[in-house]
Image (tube, helix red, strand yellow):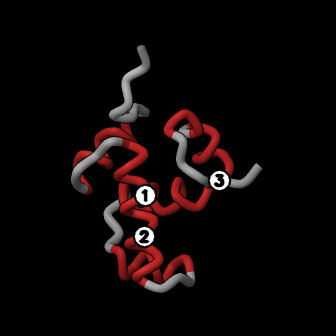
Amino acid sequence: MSVEDATWNEHAHTGLSKREAEVMELIATGHSNGEIAQRLFLSEKTVKNHVNRIYSKLGADCRMTAIGMWRSGTSGEQSS
């Protein structure tokens, strides 16, 4: 199992895809969108699209909120 798989498995309940989990992990470690794009061989626009989907899935409105939710292992969606 790779580190990326372990990260994704740990956060699978968030509903993020493996790529979104990879992007979120880089966000949580302080990387900018440009740095993430270079590291993952993506365009910055693609990274921005991933970030917007991550925010939507986590129920976050900004980077800091998303990081807090990611680190605590929660999402903004409440189950009834």
Q: Is mark 3 on a helix, strand or loop?
A: helix
Location of residue 8 in the rendering, given as x and y in whole percent from the top left corner: 60, 46
Q: In this view, does 20 lie above or below 36?
A: above
According to the image, label 1 marks what residue? 53
Left/right placement of residue 5 relative to residue 16 reads right
Q: Residue pushed farthest right?
A: 1
According to the image, label 3 marks what residue? 3
Q: In which quarter of the image is residue 79?
A: top left
According to the image, label 2 marks what residue? 49
Q: CA separation, marks 1 and 2?
A: 6 Å
75 and 25: which is toward the camera: 75
> Which residue lies at the image location 36% right of the left edge and 55% below the top edge?
28
Among numbered discs 2 and 3, the one appearing first in the sequence: 3
Count neighbours of disc 2 (C-alpha within 10 A) and say few if under 14, some if 14 to 19, many if 20 or more: few
> Which residue lies at the image location 56% right of the left edge and 84% below the top edge?
41
Left/right placement of residue 2 relative to residue 49 reads right
| Cβ–Cβ under 8 Å for marks 1 and 2 | yes
Q: CA separation, marks 1 and 3?
A: 22 Å
Q: What element carries label 1?
A: helix
Location of residue 42 in the rendering, given as x and y in whole percent from the top left corner: 53, 82
Left/right placement of residue 14 relative to residue 34 reads right
78 and 36: which is toward the camera: 78
Image quadrant holding the C terminus, namely top left
